[in-house]
């Protein structure tokens, strides 16, 4: 009976939220095609899509966002694989409690991206904590000798923040798989006399591949829509897609609102496409679970 009471309150709430989402989707799409304009004539047009697709700024922002997302994702996956190997060794030889080790490496998840970006800014900017420390111990002459890491045109500060925040997420996805594999496949490693590294490389890593692939595309989808990190740690040029949209919107011109909607639709389509890829990968690798490989 208690279950049905919860459903009575939950279903209307979900329906109410879905109405907001669907209306927002309808409003954005209709505006992008020229309907419901606040100023000017309302009617179907592809003018705004044409403007966006002919805009050099859009392609430069798209390239910059793609570059930062792919580089950050690859580095995060590589670091995660290394940490997973360390976790496997700790799980086998019990240097420290595995639960404590897991909590420590997943602790950055507790820090919001906004705060994480500010931490990186304060720590790595030219007059930040690290440069002042290096100056104090005599490694650099003054803070101006410290390399520009944050608010740089290459997006190094953005990449550092993304990697720092997404590695724990990938580990959270992969560590349960390591625990499950380790207990079921350990005897196989002993039979073939595999070293720890060989066992991880030949058995654990291939079985972790589906999880790593899905995690990579999930964080890729987030990077494309992320705003706060590139806004705090980026530069005026080049800028990420989310910041590019924000700057157009903040101009205050009502006629630019349809252009903003078009770019938001492109960002949503990229994220949706990434979600479809994740789903297809999940369906492809699900057969291994069904066969009892894991």
Image (cartoon, rainbow, N blue to C red):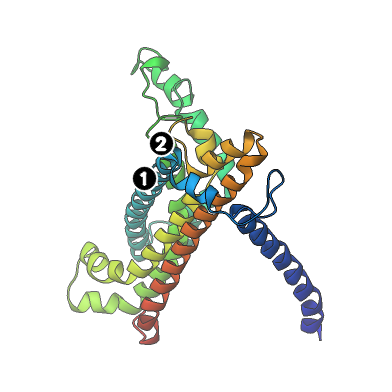
Q: Which mark is residue 102?
A: none
Q: Which residue is mark 2?
A: 155
Position of residue 37 relative to residue 81, above or below, is above
Residue in the image at 47% along x and 65% along y:
275
Q: Residue 67 got which mark?
A: 1
Helix, strand or loop status at disc 2: loop
- Say which of 113 and 221 sits in front: 221
Total numbered circles: 2
Q: Nearer the viewer, residue 168 or 197?
A: 168
Which residue is at 49% across, 63% downward? Answer: 272
State yes or no: discs 1 and 2 in contact (Cβ < 8 Å). Answer: yes
Q: Can residue 160 be seen from the camera position used here?
A: no
Q: CA distance from mark 1 to mark 2?
A: 9 Å
Q: Is residue 121 above or below residue 87?
A: above
Q: Position of residue 112 (x, y in %)?
A: 58, 46
Please tell me which residue is depicted at 61% across the width and 47% down the height of the picture: 258
Where does the image place residue 124, in percent across and percent down from the top left?
A: 45, 29
The C terminus is located in which quarter? bottom left
Which tag is nearer the camera, tag 1 or tag 2?
1
């Amino acid at each position: 009976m208690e279950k049905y009471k919860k459903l009575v309150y939950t279903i209307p709430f979900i329906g109410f939220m879905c109405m907001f989402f669907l209306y927002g989707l309808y409003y954005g799409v209709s505006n992008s095609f020229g309907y419901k304009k606040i100023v000017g004539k309302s009617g179907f047009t592809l003018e705004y899509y044409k403007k966006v697709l002919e805009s050099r700024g859009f392609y430069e922002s798209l390239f910059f966002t793609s570059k930062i997302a792919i580089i950050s994702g690859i580095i995060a996956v590589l670091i995660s694989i290394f940490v997973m190997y360390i976790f496997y060794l700790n799980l086998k030889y019990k240097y420290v409690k595995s639960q404590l080790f897991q909590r420590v490496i997943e602790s950055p998840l507790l820090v919001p991206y906004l705060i994480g970006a500010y931490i990186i800014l304060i720590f790595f900017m030219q007059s930040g904590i690290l440069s002042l420390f290096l100056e104090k111990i005599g490694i650099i002459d003054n803070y101006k000798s410290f390399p520009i890491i944050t608010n740089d045109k290459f997006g190094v500060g953005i990449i550092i923040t993304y990697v720092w925040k997404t590695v724990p997420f990938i580990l959270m996805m992969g560590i349960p798989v390591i625990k499950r594999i380790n207990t079921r496949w350990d005897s196989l490693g002993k039979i073939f006399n595999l070293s720890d590294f060989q066992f991880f490389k030949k058995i654990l890593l291939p079985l972790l591949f589906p999880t790593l692939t899905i995690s990579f595309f999930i964080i890729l989808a987030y990077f494309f829509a992320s705003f706060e990190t590139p806004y705090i740690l980026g530069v005026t040029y080049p800028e990420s897609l989310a910041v590019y949209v924000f700057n157009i919107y903040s101009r205050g011109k009502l006629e630019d609102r349809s252009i903003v909607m078009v770019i938001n639709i492109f960002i949503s389509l990229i994220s949706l496409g990434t979600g479809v890829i994740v789903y297809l990968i999940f369906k492809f690798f699900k057969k291994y679970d069904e066969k009892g490989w894991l």
